[in-house]
Amino acid sequence: MSTKTLLTFVVLFLTIQFCVAQEIPEVPKKSVIANPVKPYFVLQSGEKSVGIDQDDSTFDINVINPEGIKEIQVFKDKTAIDKYGEKGVNGVVLIVFNDSYLLPKDIQERLDKAK
């Protein structure tokens, strides 16, 4: 084996060792968005609708069965503000339920209190 080949082999070997020895940074498992902006949710069933403020921690969207959703509309920017006022600044998600969908108790109570 020539000196040049041996030197190439050693450099390659050391390079591989160096790369393997480097720590691979751990990818965060949580969202990379530090402060996610929450939209204003509007839930509609029949003629009644109710808005859910961004800071309402009692609202859990996960209680909604996707099978009960008839339609979802997303409003952004000027359209959201024109339609929902200051509450629409971060966008609005309108969720319209099927007429036959049995709403979760929390949502039904909110709609019953709506005007």
Image: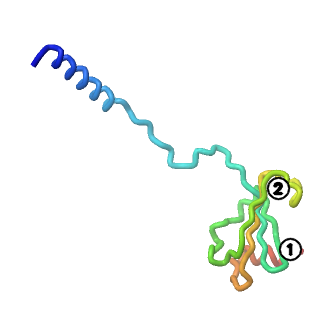
Check disc 1 and give the amino acid type.
Ala
Residue at x 72%, y 72% (from the top left corner):
71
Q: Position of residue 31 (x, y in %)?
A: 57, 48
Element assignment for label 1: loop
Residue 21 left/right relative to 84: left
Residue 114 badge = 1
The quarter of the displayed image where residue 92 is located: bottom right
In the image, residue 72 sits, relative to residue 89, either above or below, namely: below
Q: Where in the figure is residue 106, as x and y percent of width and height?
A: 72, 74
Say few, some or many: other residues with alpha carbon within 10 Å of mark 2 (under 14 / 14 to 19 / 20 or more).
many
Looking at the rendering, in which quadrant would you find the N terminus?
A: top left
Nearer to us of marks 1 and 2 is 2
Q: Is 38 placed above or below 28 here?
A: below
Instruction: Provide the residue designation for mark 2.
Output: 88
User: How many tags in the picture?
Assistant: 2
**Tag 2 or tag 1, which sits nearer the N-term?**
2
Residue ID at (72%, 54%): 38
Q: Is residue 16 above or below residue 92?
A: above
Mark 1 Cα shell of 10 Å, populated few (<14), some (14-19), many (≥20)? few
Mark 1 to mark 2 CA distance (whole Å)? 19 Å
Relative to the observer, which residue lies in front, 21 or 4? Answer: 4
Residue 70's quadrant in the figure?
bottom right
Residue at 63 percent across and 74 percent down: it is 65
Q: Position of residue 52 (x, y in %)?
A: 78, 63
- Quadrant position of the C terminus in the picture: bottom right
Q: In terms of secondary structure, where does tag 2 sit? A: helix
**Figure colour scheme:** rainbow
Q: Amino acid at mark 2?
A: Gly
Q: Give the residue at the far left of this rendering.
A: 1
Residue 59: percent from left, percent from top: 71, 65
